[in-house]
Amino acid sequence: MPGLGDAATATTVESPADQGVERAGPGIARVGQIGAVLLSVAAALAVWELVSRTGLIAERDLPSMSSSFRELWSLVQTTSFWGAFAQTVRGWALGLAVATALAVPIGILLGSSDFAARALRVPIEFLRPIPSAALIPLLFLTLGTTLRSEVFLAAFGAFWPLLVQTMYGVRDVDPLAIDTARSFGVGRFERLYRIKLPSAVPYIATGVRISSAVSLILAFTAELFMGIPGLGQKVNFAQAYGLNDQLYAYALATGFLGVAIHLVSSAAERRALRWHPSQRTAAA
Amino acid sequence: MSSRATNRLKIAAEIAVPLAILGGWQLWTVHAHSQFFPRLSTILVTFRKMWLFSQFGEHVVPSLERIGLGFGIAVLAGVLLGIPLFLSLCGYLLAMPHIEYWRAIPPPALLPISVVLLHSIGNTQKISFIAFFCLFPVLLNTIDGVRSIDPTLVDTARSYGVRGLARIRRIVLPAALPQIAAGMRNSLSLAVIMMVLSEYFSSTSGVGYVLLISKNTFQLAPMWAAILLIGLLGYVLNVLFILAERRVLAWHRGWRAATA
Amino acid sequence: MLLEIETLSKTYGTGPKVTRAIGSVSLTVDEGEFACVVGPSGCGKTTLLKCIAGLLKPTSGEVLLRGKRVAGPPEQMALVFQEYSRSLMPWASVRNNVLLPLRHKKLKTAERRALVEEALEAVGLTTFIDHYPWQLSGGMQQRVAIARALAYQPTILLMDEPFASVDAQTRGDLEDLILRVREEFGITILFVTHDIDESVYLADRVVVLTHSPTEVKEIVPVALPRPRDQIATKELAEFAQLRAHVYRLIKREQEAGDPETLAPSVPDTRTPV
């Protein structure tokens, strides 16, 4: 295995990626990592092309990589594609916004009041594991196939992880900081927004990252199953009419949207985490 | 108020609040006369009629099978892939872009594709779908768990000549297990969701299928009973997992408490 | 000669960030000897020990155990770390922890059992054989680590500041334990410490290192009578003289090693991310 035993305190447990960085020096390692990503993606695309063109999987079922991307390219030039894209983004954003607007305040309340937390513990424990997907038929019948259904579903699903994370964040404050503040006569409310909230920010950031993924999944699901306008509806349509090229193209597009959202929310999370005192390495 | 009194009040609230919610639910549905929100009592009666036990074998069992197999395969694959992937530089770099892509894509986007590719809406299609997406939390947590093993422990193993498979079996796996278990818990709740989605989308049996059918036939009480069952399923599976985790990882809790 | 270390050096990094942790260390350890290694803080004692133990590859020079080159952790060597709690497996009982190194040795189950029980008896932990390490105190955990090393039946035992994380009274008990154990099992011990008193108390010879880049400054023979005793031995005038001598050497090294011109000291343990 490369590089083992060479680093300063060599163990076999350092991530191979870390070892590569140590040996090669940071600049070269960056290039190497990017190169590996590109190589890996290129290889996967090549395999896809091969598998479908050689008929390993019937081209009918698995359109070739080139034709899928070609289809995607032509779709990207239509307004209908971007309309659907925007609708999904809208559903995701609204769902996430509603979930955040509810989960953060309630989470702060439950995190700072043990009484409230315990009183509501049982209902939360029961409601939390309910897959939001189970609510689709109910929403279909009550709110109908409208944006409201999509936002409700997305918000319902995204609410729980964020609630739990916020509660943890508010509760996880260093008791020493609180005691210090109390000894200086800092009032309860001020303690909350000067100490507890800033301390909870990284947790909330993690919660937002998780919730944003959940919101996207549910927004898409609502579109897929209820025919609400958006990428999900396009996928459903393509499948119903046997338009496989379109099916794969839209699936790719959805994948890219998912990756984009993941990258943005992870980056935001990392920035929030870096700021947190627990993450700062002690000054030498 | 004395702390004993506040504690009693908290316990009282813990019991009273759920009961109040249930009572409120019943009262509201009785007065609302809404066809979409049948009385809680009606729902409970329908629940008993359907799931205990007439339709249990027909629908609940297949659903549980799919969850079980999908989850099981995902866990096995996640651990078996995660360990070597971490230990091999090439494998790690090549695999990470793919792992990052597949964990970010919304799983329902692949539902129609899974039906098309596998030419069927049978068990294999659903189990593969469930297993595929449940793989990633386990895989990522395995990699993370292996990564954070204490270097001193590894040095100890090396200096005592514990190598290869033995080292993985006796040191790497147990040390990474707490983290792997966290991934498994995520995967399990994901499995329930994927089961519902895949059955709702295309199936001839299962709880998700019942959900779909009752919606289509406008039977609200059975639909609510199905929703209730799904919620219960998710809850029970989670509790069972936590109990199992407590037993297997008892050492972990003790260790954490001692080194706190 | 059991252990020969020839012009060992260890350098990290390249170009402007190069760190010469170990300059050139040569020393020998005889069979049955108790050799202590002391040096100013940050002089790379742990790095040296890890190179000797085969966990790190030296940049140049070599380590010979009974004439054979050490390329990886050799079978006749056992290592006891300073962070005992991190070297013991929290998911296994004391018994299974001590058993770990024996599993791949070609022994019968009964033989393994006997070795484990014997080793635990030697360190006085027989009653705790089925406890978990984290249920024990720091000193007891270190004794488990020592028992594990003993059960392994090595020819030479390397110890990296093993009693540094333990309170002073327990340290005294552990020092006497290791002396007893050496008598009983007749193993050679190479003992790294920053505690000068401890080094003189335990050793047959004290190896004093320079500051970074590390070399051997002086080897001080310790002819104090055995068996050693925490009170009687430390009352001897000779003890005080030896101790003062070693202390002076180290103090000189510490002053000479001016922080402005020194290469940065290499961290001994990996900083957790």
Image: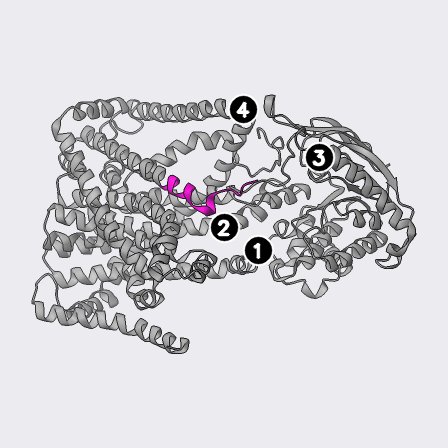
Give the magenta part as a residue range.
Answer: A269-284
Judge if badges 2 and 4 mark residues of a common chain: no
Pointers 1 and 4 within a single chain: no
Secondary structure mainly formed by the magenta segment: helix
Residue bearing the label numbered 3: C51
SS for callout 2: helix
Which element carries disc 1, helix, strand or loop? loop
Q: Which numbered mark, 3 or 1, is in the foreground of this view?
A: 3
The answer to whether residue B132 shows anywhere in this view is yes
Q: In which quarter of the image is the N terminus of chain B?
A: bottom left
Give the percent coordinates (x, y) of residue C50: 69, 38
The answer to whether B140 is drawn above or below residue C226 in the figure is above
Measuring from the top left, give residue C193's x and y in whole percent.
75, 45
Residue identified by numbered label 2: B177
- C-alpha distance separating marks 2 and 3: 31 Å
Q: Distance between the residues labelled 2 and 4?
A: 32 Å
Quarter location, residue A39: top left
Foreground disc of the pair 2, 4: 4
Q: Residue C91 carries which label?
A: 1
Q: How far apart are marks 1 and 4 (CA)?
A: 37 Å
In the rendered structure, the residue with mark 2 lies on which chain? B
Q: Name the residue beneath numbered marker 4.
A: A24
**Secondary structure found at label 3:** helix
